[in-house]
Image (tube, coloured by chain):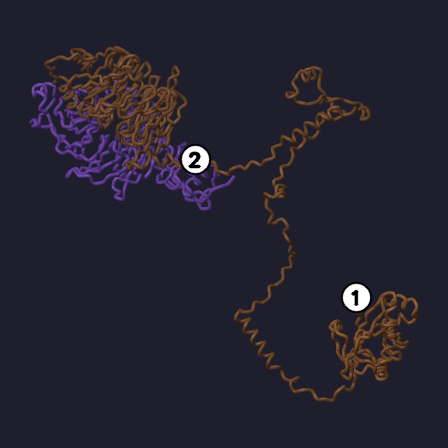
Chain colours: A purple, B brown
C-alpha cells in the first residue's frame, strides 16, 4: 500500500502537534487520520481525550480516502501534503418541535423570540424554548413573510407580509403580551412574498408578485398618511376592515420582469433582490436604480448574504445552492455550486458567525448544513421534516430553525468550534 | 528454263584458245563470255548440238555483228545480221521438219554435241575439247585443266608481329597530340549534359517486368464472369451419424424412430436413419444415392447466380440532422412538485395568466386552486358534478375561471391574485344591464347569489346537453363550450360574458365535435371533429380551411401563439403538426407515444410543446416556428417526462405550460398534478 508524506497543522493551539512530516497510508480516510492525531496528542499530553477531527487539504474538506481526494483535486502525491485539521463540527441536535395549524411559510428568530408566518393567515411569536407566546392575527390571507424590526426593551416592532397584498407593522409588548397593529402598508398589487429590514432598523423593503420592490418606513408614527383611494371602493368600507394606519411606500423600485421572490439589504444603502425572471439585482436604496444584475438560468427562490465572507447564496428551482459574489462587475459568475439536494432549494441562510457554513432547505424534505469547503457533500443532512421545507433560519445564539409543509417548526442546537467561530 | 548463263573469269588457258580459234561464238568483253544455248529436247542432246555448231563455225567463219540483240527482231527478214564486211548474212534455208529432226536424232551420232546458233541460225557440232570444257564447268571445276587451285599460300602480310616494320615510314605528329576535333566534340557533350539537354540514361530496372495479360480485360466479356464466380453451395460434411458404425448416442431409439417415420420429409432433422453395421463388409449399397445426387443437382440449379450489389450507405447519414436537445434548453427535465389533494382523476388543468395559480378540475366533483411554487392547495370548491374542463381567463385584467360539469358551465371568481382585478371582475359581472327585448337563447344565464356567491360562483350557464369542453378567447370576453352530439347542429356555442349572450355559430352538423379553439390573434375559430379540423372565419362566417389529420379520432388540439401552426393529438397515438400556411395535410406526424394522446399544449413564449398520453408520459418537444415564411418549423423531441402512474388504463389526462417559465404541468388519472421543470 502506498504511503503519503503529510504534515499536519492547525490554528487551534490546544490541539497542535509537532511540525514534522508523517508517512500515512494513501487509502486512509477521515476516521483513520483522526485516530492518528489523537494518538499524537495523547503521546504529547497524557490527559487528552478522544476528539473527532475534520481534515482540510488545500482548503477542501476530505470526504473520501486521501488518495482519491488528491486525485480528484489534482494534487501531486510526490510532495509533502499539508493537511489542516479542525475539530469536527458536531451534528446539530434537535431541540424543539413547534406545531402549527398550517404550513409554515417563513421564520425569523432573534436572540429571544421566534417569529413564524403561517398559511393559516396568522403569524406566531414563540419563545426559544418552544412556547407559543402570541398569535398575530390580522391578515385576510396567507402570511408569506415575517421580520423583526427592532426591540426597545420590552417593546418590539415586527412585520408580517401577506398574500392579501399588505404588510402589517405590529408593536408587541412582551411583558404585558399586548399586540397592536400600528400600520398597514398598502401599495402592492400582488402578494407580498418577501420583506427585509434594513441594518439601521428604520426602513424595510418588500418584494411582491407584482414585480415591484417597495421601500417603506419602519418607524411607527401616529399620523395617517394620505393614500389615493381606489375610486371604486367606498371609503367607509375600507376603513372598517383596516388594521392600523395606512402607510404608503417611500420608494418603488421597478425593473424586474417577473415576481420578486426574495429581498435583502447588503448594507444600509444597497438592496439585493432575487426574482422569477432569473436575475438577482442590486439596487441603490437612495436613488432606486439598478446597480448590478446577476443573471442565472433558473427561477430564484431565496437568497442570503453573509457579511463575513461577502458571498450571496441563492436557492433556485433546481437542485443547486449557488454562491455569487455580488461585488463582481465582470458579469454574473457562479463561484460555487453546492449540489446534494434532489428538489428545489426553497430556503438558504448563511451562518451568522461562521464564514463557511450555511444551511439550506429543499422540497426534498431535507435541511442540509453546508460548509463551502466541501461542495459535493454537506456536513449534515437534517431529515426531521416529513414534507417540503419552506424556510430556514439561524440565530446568533446557536440555534438553527426550519419550518415546512408538515406544519412543524424544528429548532436544532449546534455547537460551533471556538476557533472557527472567531474566524 | 530457256537459257543457261555461264559466267566467270576465264583462266589463262582459255585465253589461249580464244587466240587460236578466232571464230569462237563467245561474244563479250575480256572479262566474261555469254553463251546462249537453245536446248532441243534434253540437256544431254544439247551439248551435241553445241559442238556441232562449233564445227559449223569452223567450216564457214561467219560472224554476226548485230551484237546482243534478240534474234526475234530478224524473224521477218531474210537475213539474220551482218558479217564483218557489212554484208548481210542470210538465213540458211532450213528444210528440216520434225521428222527430219527425229531422224537426225536417231541416226546422227553427233546429235548430242550439235547446238543451234541463233545468231547465224546454223547448227554447230562441238569439238571434243569444247565438250570437255563444258563438262568441267558443269562440275564446277576451273576451265583450264592445268590450273592448280591448291597451291601452297605465301603469307606476305602476317598477323604475327615481326621485329621489323613492314614499312619504314616515321609516325605522324598527329598521332602524338590530342585531337582537337575530339576535344571540341567532348566539350559540346559536356555542355549539353550541363544544360540538361542530354539526360543520362535511366538505370535499368532490376526487377523483372511481366506483362499483365489480364490488365485490360473487360469484366463483362465472356471470360470476365470468371471473376464474378459464385461458388457452388458447399455440401455438408458427413457426421458421426452417417458412419457405418456410429457411436450409440447417434442411433435413434425406438420412439425417436417412430417420430421420425411419422414426420414429413421436410420436417425431419436427419434425412436418413443412422444404422449400425458390424463391419464394412456388411454395409449394403447406398440406397439414397440417386436421391442425394438429385438434391445436389437441385441445389446447384437453384443456387442464386447473381451477385446482389449492396448499396453502401452509412445508416447514420440517413438520419436527419437535428440539433442536440442539450442545445435547445430550457425545457422541463425533472419532476419538481406534486400537487396532491384530489381524490379522483384530474381531467383538466389550467394556469392563471400570471403563473401564480393553477386550477384543476377532477372527477371527485371539486375544483381546486393551487399555488404553483409551493404546491399548496389554496381553495377547494365543490361543484355538482364531475368536472370535465376548466379554463382560466387569459386576460390578466379579469379574474375568472370557467368550469364545466354535466350540463353547466360555471364562471368562478377564485379571488386569487390582485384584489383590484378581483373586484373589477365582480363589477364587470354585476354591471350587466339586460337588454329591452329578451331573445330566446340556447342556454340560460343565471347570476349566483348568497352562499354560492361567497363561494366564488358568479354566473351559471345551463346548457341543454352535457358540456365537454370550455375554452376562452384570448381577449377573455368570449368563451366557447362544446356539447358533443352526433345528431344535432347544437354542438358548439359561443358565449359573450359581458353581454350574457349566446350564439350557435353552426347551422349544420359536420360530425361529432371533439374540441374547439379560438385563434389567438385573428377572428378564426377551429373546430375539431373526429377526423378533420375545420377553420372558420367568424367575421365572414365561412369555412376557410379543412385540415385532414389522417387520424382516426382527434382527442385534443392546441394553437400556436403565433396562430399559424396547430397540433392535434389523437387517440391512435399520433400527434399531427399542421402548418396552416403550408398545407391542409400534416406537416409532421409524431408517433412517440405508445398509447392514446389525451392532451396537447403549446408554450406561450418558449418554442415548446407537450403532449400527454395514456402511457403515463409527457413528451416535450422543441417546436421552433420561424418568422421567415420560407423556413419550415423545426420539431425536435427533447424529453420524455415520466411520473404519473397508470390507473384504470389512463395516464396523463391534460397538460398545460406555465405562462412564463419553461415548466409543464400534467394532470393524471392517479389523482395528482405534477410540475416538471
Numbered label attached to residue B362? none
The 10 Å Cα crowd at callout 2, few under 14, some 14 to 19, many 20 or more, is few
Quick check: B187 left or right of B59? Answer: left
Q: In which quarter of the image is residue A371?
A: top left
* Relative vertical location of residue B245 with respect to residue B325 in this rendering, above or below: above
Give coordinates of residue B102: x percent, y percent: 88, 65
Spatial CA distance of label 1 from label 2 is 96 Å
> In the rendered structure, which disc, 1 or 2, sits on the residue that comes first in sequence?
1
Total tally of numbered discs in the picture? 2
Instruction: Report the residue marked by disc 1.
Output: B1
Residue at 82% from the left image edge and 26% from the top image edge: B281
Contact check, label 1 and label 2, Cβ < 8 Å: no
Quick check: B216 left or right of A421? Answer: right
Residue at 32% from the left image edge and 39% from the top image edge: A335
Along the viewing direction, whichever of A362 and A180 lies nearer the viewer: A362
Per the image, label 1 sits on a secondary structure element best described as loop
The answer to whether residue A365 is visible is no
Numbered label attached to residue B319? 2
The answer to whether residue B39 is visible is yes
> Chain for mark 2?
B
Along the viewing direction, whichever of A52 and A363 lies nearer the viewer: A363
Quick check: B390 left or right of B253? Answer: left
Give coordinates of residue B21: x percent, y percent: 85, 82
Q: In which quarter of the image is residue A96?
A: top left
Per the image, label 2 sits on a secondary structure element best described as loop
> Chain for mark 1?
B
Give coordinates of residue B531: x percent, y percent: 34, 21
Amino acid at each position: 500500500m502506498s504511503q503519503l508524506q503529510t504534515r499536519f497543522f492547525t490554528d487551534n493551539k490546544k490541539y497542535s502537534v509537532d511540525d514534522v512530516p508523517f508517512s500515512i497510508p494513501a487509502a486512509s480516510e477521515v476516521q483513520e487520520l483522526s485516530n492518528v492525531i489523537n494518538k499524537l496528542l495523547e503521546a504529547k499530553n497524557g490527559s487528552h481525550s478522544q476528539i473527532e477531527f475534520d481534515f482540510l487539504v488545500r482548503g477542501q474538506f476530505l470526504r473520501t480516502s486521501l488518495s482519491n481526494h488528491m486525485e480528484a483535486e489534482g494534487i501531486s502525491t510526490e510532495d509533502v501534503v499539508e493537511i489542516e485539521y479542525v475539530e469536527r463540527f458536531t451534528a446539530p441536535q434537535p431541540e424543539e418541535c413547534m406545531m402549527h395549524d398550517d404550513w409554515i411559510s417563513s421564520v425569523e428568530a432573534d436572540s429571544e423570540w421566534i417569529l413564524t408566518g403561517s398559511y393559516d393567515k396568522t403569524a406566531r411569536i414563540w419563545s426559544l424554548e418552544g412556547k407559543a407566546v402570541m398569535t398575530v392575527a390580522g391578515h385576510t390571507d396567507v402570511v408569506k413573510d415575517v421580520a423583526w424590526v427592532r426591540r426597545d426593551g420590552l417593546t418590539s416592532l415586527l412585520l408580517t407580509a401577506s398574500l392579501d397584498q399588505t404588510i402589517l407593522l405590529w408593536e408587541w409588548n412582551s411583558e404585558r403580551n399586548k399586540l397592536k397593529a400600528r400600520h398597514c402598508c398598502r401599495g402592492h398589487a400582488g402578494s407580498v412574498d418577501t420583506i427585509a429590514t434594513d441594518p439601521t432598523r428604520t426602513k424595510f423593503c418588500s418584494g411582491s408578485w407584482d414585480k415591484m420592490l417597495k421601500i417603506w418606513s419602519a418607524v411607527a408614527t401616529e399620523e395617517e398618511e394620505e393614500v389615493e383611494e381606489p375610486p371604486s371602493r367606498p371609503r367607509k368600507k375600507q376603513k372598517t376592515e383596516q388594521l392600523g394606519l395606512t402607510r404608503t411606500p417611500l420608494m418603488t423600485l421597478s425593473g424586474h420582469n417577473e415576481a420578486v421572490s426574495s429581498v435583502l439589504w447588503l448594507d444600509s444603502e444597497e438592496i439585493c433582490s432575487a426574482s422569477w425572471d432569473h436575475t438577482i439585482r442590486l439596487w441603490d436604496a437612495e436613488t432606486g436604480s439598478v446597480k448590478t444584475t446577476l443573471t442565472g438560468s433558473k427561477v430564484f427562490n431565496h437568497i442570503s448574504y453573509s457579511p463575513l465572507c461577502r458571498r450571496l447564496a441563492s436557492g433556485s428551482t433546481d437542485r443547486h445552492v449557488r454562491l455569487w459574489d455580488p461585488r463582481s462587475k465582470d458579469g454574473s459568475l457562479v463561484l460555487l455550486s453546492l449540489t446534494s439536494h434532489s428538489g428545489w432549494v426553497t430556503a438558504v441562510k448563511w451562518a451568522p458567525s461562521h464564514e463557511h457554513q450555511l444551511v439550506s432547505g429543499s422540497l426534498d424534505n431535507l435541511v442540509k448544513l453546508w460548509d463551502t469547503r466541501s461542495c459535493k457533500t454537506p456536513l449534515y443532512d437534517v431529515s426531521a421534516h416529513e414534507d417540503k421545507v419552506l424556510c430556514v433560519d439561524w440565530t446568533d445564539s446557536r440555534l438553527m430553525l426550519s419550518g415546512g409543509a408538515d406544519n412543524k417548526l424544528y429548532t436544532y442546537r449546534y455547537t460551533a468550534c471556538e476557533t472557527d467561530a472567531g474566524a | 528454263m530457256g537459257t543457261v548463263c555461264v559466267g566467270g573469269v576465264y583462266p589463262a588457258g582459255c585465253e589461249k584458245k580464244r587466240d587460236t580459234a578466232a571464230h569462237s561464238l563467245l561474244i563479250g568483253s575480256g572479262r566474261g563470255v555469254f553463251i546462249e544455248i537453245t536446248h532441243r529436247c534434253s540437256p544431254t542432246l544439247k551439248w551435241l548440238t553445241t559442238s556441232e555448231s562449233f564445227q559449223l563455225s569452223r567450216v564457214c567463219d561467219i560472224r554476226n555483228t548485230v551484237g546482243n540483240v534478240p534474234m526475234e527482231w530478224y524473224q521477218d527478214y531474210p537475213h539474220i545480221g551482218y558479217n564483218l564486211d557489212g554484208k548481210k548474212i542470210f538465213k540458211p534455208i532450213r528444210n528440216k521438219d520434225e521428222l527430219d529432226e527425229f531422224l537426225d536424232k536417231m541416226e546422227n551420232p553427233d546429235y548430242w554435241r550439235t547446238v543451234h546458233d541463233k545468231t547465224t541460225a546454223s547448227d554447230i557440232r562441238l569439238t571434243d575439247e569444247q565438250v570437255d570444257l563444258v563438262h568441267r564447268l558443269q562440275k564446277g571445276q576451273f576451265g583450264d585443266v592445268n590450273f592448280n587451285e591448291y597451291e601452297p599460300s605465301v603469307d606476305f602480310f602476317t598477323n604475327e608481329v615481326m621485329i621489323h616494320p613492314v614499312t619504314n615510314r616515321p609516325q605522324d605528329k598527329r598521332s602524338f597530340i590530342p585531337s582537337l576535333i575530339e576535344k571540341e566534340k567532348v566539350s559540346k557533350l559536356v555542355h549539353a549534359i550541363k544544360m540538361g539537354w542530354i539526360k543520362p540514361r535511366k538505370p535499368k530496372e532490376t526487377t523483372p517486368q511481366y506483362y499483365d495479360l489480364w490488365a485490360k480485360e473487360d469484366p463483362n466479356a465472356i471470360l470476365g464472369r470468371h471473376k464474378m464466380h459464385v461458388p457452388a453451395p458447399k455440401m455438408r460434411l458427413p457426421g458421426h451419424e452417417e458412419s457405418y458404425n456410429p457411436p450409440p448416442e447417434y442411433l435413434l431409439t425406438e420412439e425417436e424412430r417412430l417420430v421420425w417415420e411419422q414426420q414429413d420429409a421436410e420436417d425431419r432433422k436427419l434425412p436418413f436413419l443412422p444404422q449400425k453395421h458390424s463391419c464394412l463388409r456388411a454395409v449394403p449399397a447406398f440406397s439414397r444415392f440417386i436421391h442425394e445426387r438429385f438434391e445436389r443437382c437441385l441445389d446447384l440449379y437453384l443456387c442464386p447466380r447473381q451477385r446482389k450489389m449492396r448499396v453502401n450507405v452509412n445508416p447514420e447519414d440517413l438520419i436527419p440532422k437535428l440539433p442536440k436537445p442539450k442545445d435547445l434548453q430550457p425545457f422541463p427535465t425533472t419532476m419538481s412538485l406534486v400537487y396532491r389533494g384530489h381524490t379522483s382523476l384530474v381531467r383538466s388543468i389550467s394556469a392563471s395568466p400570471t403563473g401564480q395559480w393553477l386550477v384543476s378540475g377532477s372527477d371527485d366533483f371539486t375544483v381546486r386552486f393551487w399555488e404553483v411554487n409551493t404546491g399548496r392547495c389554496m381553495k377547494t370548491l365543490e361543484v355538482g358534478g364531475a368536472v370535465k374542463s376548466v379554463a382560466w381567463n387569459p386576460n390578466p385584467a379579469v379574474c375568472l375561471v370557467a368550469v364545466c360539469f354535466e350540463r353547466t358551465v360555471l364562471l368562478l371568481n377564485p379571488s386569487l391574485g390582485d384584489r383590484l382585478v378581483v373586484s373589477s371582475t365582480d363589477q364587470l359581472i354585476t354591471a350587466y344591464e339586460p337588454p329591452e327585448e329578451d331573445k330566446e337563447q340556447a342556454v340560460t344565464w343565471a347570476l349566483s347569489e348568497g352562499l354560492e356567491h361567497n363561494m366564488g360562483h358568479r354566473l351559471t350557464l345551463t346548457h341543454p346537453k352535457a358540456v365537454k369542453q370550455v375554452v376562452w378567447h384570448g381577449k377573455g370576453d368570449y368563451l366557447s363550450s362544446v356539447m358533443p352530439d352526433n345528431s344535432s347542429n347544437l354542438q358548439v356555442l359561443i358565449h359573450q360574458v359581458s353581454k350574457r349572450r349566446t350564439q350557435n355559430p353552426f347551422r349544420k352538423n359536420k360530425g361529432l365535435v371533439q374540441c374547439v379553439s379560438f385563434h389567438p390573434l385573428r377572428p378564426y375559430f377551429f373546430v375539431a371533429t373526429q377526423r378533420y379540423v375545420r377553420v372558420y372565419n367568424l367575421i365572414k362566417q365561412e369555412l376557410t380551411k379543412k385540415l385532414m389529420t389522417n387520424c382516426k379520432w382527434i382527442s385534443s388540439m392546441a394553437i400556436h401563439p403565433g396562430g399559424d401552426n396547430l397540433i392535434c393529438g389523437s387517440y391512435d397515438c399520433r400527434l399531427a403538426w399542421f402548418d396552416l400556411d403550408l398545407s391542409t395535410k400534416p406537416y409532421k406526424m409524431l408517433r412517440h407515444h405508445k398509447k392514446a394522446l389525451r392532451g396537447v399544449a403549446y408554450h406561450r413564449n418558449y418554442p415548446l410543446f407537450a403532449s400527454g398520453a395514456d402511457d403515463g408520459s409527457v413528451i416535450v418537444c422543441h417546436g421552433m416556428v420561424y418568422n421567415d415564411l420560407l423556413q419550415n418549423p423545426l420539431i425536435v423531441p427533447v424529453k420524455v417526462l415520466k411520473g404519473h402512474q397508470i390507473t384504470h388504463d389512463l395516464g396523463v389526462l391534460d397538460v398545460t405550460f406555465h405562462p412564463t417559465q419553461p415548466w409543464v404541468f400534467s394532470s393524471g388519472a392517479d389523482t395528482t398534478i405534477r410540475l416538471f421543470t
